Amino acid sequence: MNLTQVRAHRRWLLRLLSVLLVASAFLPVLAGCGLHSGGDALAFLRDGQLWTVHSDGSQPLQLTGSHVVGFAWSPDHHELVLRIAAVPAPTPPTGTHAAPAAPGDIAAVSINGGAALQLTPTSAGLSRGDAWWNPNGNRILYTERAAPPPQPATFVVSQVDQPVGIARHPLLNVAGLPVLSPDGMRVAAVSPDGALLLGPPGQAGRSIASDVLRALPGTSRPARVLWQPGHDALLYALAAPTGVMLDLRSLSGGVREVVTLPAVLDYAFAPDGSLLLVREPTRFSLWSVSQSGQPLWTWPETDPLVLPSWSPDGHQVLVQNGAGLQLADLRTKTVYALLTYEQSQIQAPPDAHTDWHPATGSPWATDGHALVFAAATGASWQGRPLPQPHNAASGLYVVSITSGTVGRPVLVDSGDDRAPSWSFLDPSTAFLMAS
């Protein structure tokens, strides 16, 4: 090798070394981002396993082993938090009812799979419920109970990047359902004596309101505190001479009544915080948050365990009850029947021992142009049979919704698929699920 060749070879080695150094610098970033953007994947449970699949049915991936009974998407769609039961437990056949609290653990797993990170310390006999995220995705809330109802549950705030309970804070002196601020740095909760407390997780908060309801009158349901999306304000329930009053308190000062109704079962904000959807005993009613007066729209509903889900743009509500699925269009004030089960699955009304938590995931795609559902053989879509599952009694379906036009369902998976979920759901925009 002459001098010219030696110099050329040396330059080639230097260029190769530079490339390798640059690549090595990006490897941690790539590992953190994962191999999968997560944007198109939807998740579901099958035989106690957590699976993802793309909306066209491609790239099915089993994320975890057995005994998974509940899960929730992170806001960035790159991670899921799941509840793993200590012993096999059945998943309810419809998405209106969650699996009961049971001994087991809470864990987090990447959308690409791999080893799940156990977030809870193992404790035999301690029952836990499903977990739900705050909007920024840095903390979760879940329940623990050492004894069955009517003993109250303890709410726990935990980070999702620290194992076996290193970064967790039990919330003491809490009655009802607490709510985390969007950034996870504050928690609002009602004390047993009716004080609305606000402060950092794990610390005694300051009282910002009194005589707040802990349970909704005439029901077994908890009264909720909601954080208004896009605002630093809290919504909570008070007793009124004519029923239940929902007040909105700005944390920068000022409080006002949003609506007073004879009876209330549940309520949730629209994704942008401008509307409030209220579940009354025999109907839904839609209210403007900024203007008091008459409801913007009402429509009937009597199923005690109905579960509505806001579309991301707040223009539609998917309503799942024991009869099937309906789509309520808020712009045209019309309710469309979509899916009809072969046999009604309406369940008994909840009792005093029922646990409640916010729905942990949405059937809507992030862009709102499609939704996912599971159905057994025999169900029909707008009067027409669904595509038949392949060698299975049920299937997973995706349907497009574009400019208000609802498409035909596409079968994307066949099997005992349950609890499908496509995207994160802000707890203040989610309705409650019984378990």
Image: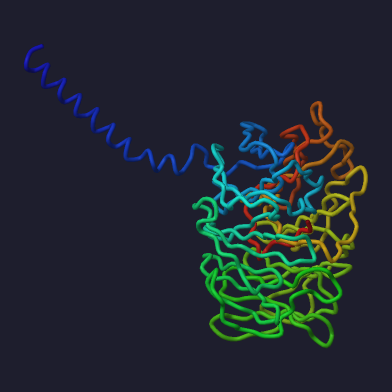
At x 69%, y 70%, the residue is: 275
Give the quadrant of the N terminus: top left
Image position, residue 391 (x, y; %): 81, 26
Residue at the far top: name it: 1
Image position, residue 378 (x, y; %): 89, 37
Residue at the far right: name it: 343
Residue at the far left: name it: 3
- Relative to 115, 300 lies left or right: right
Image position, residue 157 (x, y; %): 58, 62
At x 64%, y 52%, the residue is: 123
Residue 257 appears in the picture as rendered? yes
How are the colours assigned in the image?
rainbow
Q: How many marks?
A: 0
Image: 388 above or below 381: above
The residue nearer to you, when weighing 392 against 197, is: 197
Image position, residue 396 (x, y; %): 75, 38
Give the quadrant of the C terminus: bottom right
Residue 258 appears in the picture as rendered? no
Residue at the far bottom: name it: 241
- Relative to 119, 193 lies left or right: right
Image: 91 above or below 263: above
Image: 251 above or below 373: below
* Quarter-of-image position of residue 51: top right
At x 52%, y 65%, the residue is: 183
- Relative to 179, 435 lies left or right: right
